[in-house]
Amino acid sequence: MPLMTGEQYIESLRRLKTRVYMFGEQVENWVDHPIIRPSINSVAMTYDLAQDPEYADLMTAKSSLTGKTINRFTHLHQSTDDLIRKVKMQRLLGQKTGACFQRCVGMDAFNAVFSTTYELDEAKGTKYHENFVKFLEMIQDEDLVVDGAMTDPKGDRGKAPHAQPDKDLFLRIVERRPDGIVVRGAKAHQTGAVNSHWHLIMPTIAMREADADYAVSFACPSDAEGLFMVYGRQSCDTRKLEDPCSVDVGNSRFGGQEALVVFDDVFIPNEYVFMAGEYEFAGMMVERFAGYHRQSYGGCKVGVGDVVIGAAALAAEYNGAEKASHIKDKLIEMTHLNETLFCCGIACSAEGHPTKAGNYQIDLLLANVCKQNVTRFPYEIVRLAED
Ligand SMILES: Cc1cc2nc3c(=O)[nH]c(=O)nc-3n(C[C@H](O)[C@H](O)[C@H](O)COP(=O)(O)OP(=O)(O)OC[C@H]3O[C@@H](n4cnc5c(N)ncnc54)[C@H](O)[C@@H]3O)c2cc1C
């Protein structure tokens, strides 16, 4: 199946029976809902740019599994060059949307689950890696969006999952059947969850033996029986209900999205299970996913930074202030901060290394530096833009 266009992606969402709640009520036509649609438009951009020959080097890749041309968002990184292209692709998407485009978490989860299941099988003689490869081939062939789901509600942060008074605060296996497992719990703050076709679930912390039922990784479709989502509020979100042509609606065309994804006894067939009790490998999966995700910020937030810096420069020009030296100094400082973030994304990629499974992992220390800076610099860039 060829790569989808943005429009085909949006139409594919209409065929799902995803259950979405917002403001305490179920939303029937969530694809066209004015608060949700901007985030769908952002994801659609990951499809439209992959159709443009100008961006083919960044937006597409040759699958290591099938040899076919795929969207880079479904790719297993094969080299440090692939890792660098990932960051550049994210910067491009940030520039084109001025928002979160949500498809990175799935890509980061693919790469973490691929390498972890390989080492898990090697140690335990299980067949999780084979399961995962089949799943990923389907995702690549059908060019689908997958939510990378790690964060649990967690409850008392001082207690392990099994020690929580409410056993469902971490997602867990409640039943093991010959043909699969039944899971209960939730994943919180899930980026792009509502407009994903599938969810790829991972444990959220390193675990011990008593937490074996919580050491679970699997994939399930968005409209699985027992699965529903509560849309996350954002500041000024109801402005999106206003006429998009009126003033003060912000970035009305594009946006980000997070949701609480609830699993109310969802059955997962064995073929989609990638970890079910092997608690020794929970920490490895968490660390690898988090590393890739910290790298991602060195691309996506930089692209949004480019938009903010460009807008600030334009505002200065409109006001006839663009030649003032203090304005120039501020634009230079914003650029310096933004490019420093980019340097971190590129550096942790260039220092990447192959995993046992063959895909490439970033340098974890440098990716952590990237994350530390991303918790500071974008705020300072916006402060300077406001000034
Ligand atoms: C915009 C956005 C998008 C996101 N997208 C995704 C996504 O797509 N997929 C996903 O899986 N997650 C996602 N997340 C979740 C994100 O990864 C988590 O918010 C993050 O890991 C922190 O977890 P937490 O919210 O449970 O906070 P915590 O980790 O609990 O931190 C809260 C506070 O408690 C403190 N604390 C934590 N543990 C302890 C302890 N044991 N003792 C003392 N203090 C402690 C921390 O230092 C912090 O101050 C997203 C979050 C946001 C904001």
Image (tube, rainbow, N blue to C red):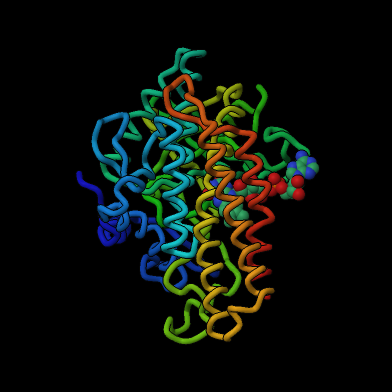
Q: Position of residue 93 (x, y in %)?
A: 42, 57
Question: Could you tell whether 158 is left or right of 300 in the image?
Answer: right
Q: Nearer the viewer, residue 170 or 146?
A: 146
| Quarter residue 347 falls in | top right
Rendered view: 245 above or below 3: below
Question: Could you tell whether 379 is left or right of 30 in the image?
Answer: right
Quadrant into which the C terminus falls: bottom right
| Quarter residue 309 falls in | bottom right
Q: Nearer the viewer, residue 365 or 128?
A: 365
Q: Nearer the viewer, residue 226 or 288?
A: 288
Q: Position of residue 194 (x, y in %)?
A: 44, 56
Asked whether residue 205 is in view, the answer is yes
x 50%, y 86%: residue? 247
Q: Position of residue 127 (x, y in %)?
A: 40, 19
Q: Nearer the viewer, residue 90 or 225?
A: 90
x 41%, y 63%: residue? 96
Q: Position of residue 17 (x, y in %)?
A: 35, 56
Q: How many marks?
A: 0
Quadrant into which the N terminus falls: top left
Rendered view: 79 above or below 103: above
Q: Residue furthest right?
A: 158
Q: Residue furthest left?
A: 1
Question: Could you tell whether 184 is left or right of 52 in the image?
Answer: right
Rendered view: 119 above or below 102: above
x 34%, y 48%: residue? 59
Asked whether residue 188 is in view, the answer is no
Rendered view: 383 above or below 50: below
| Quarter residue 80 falls in | top left
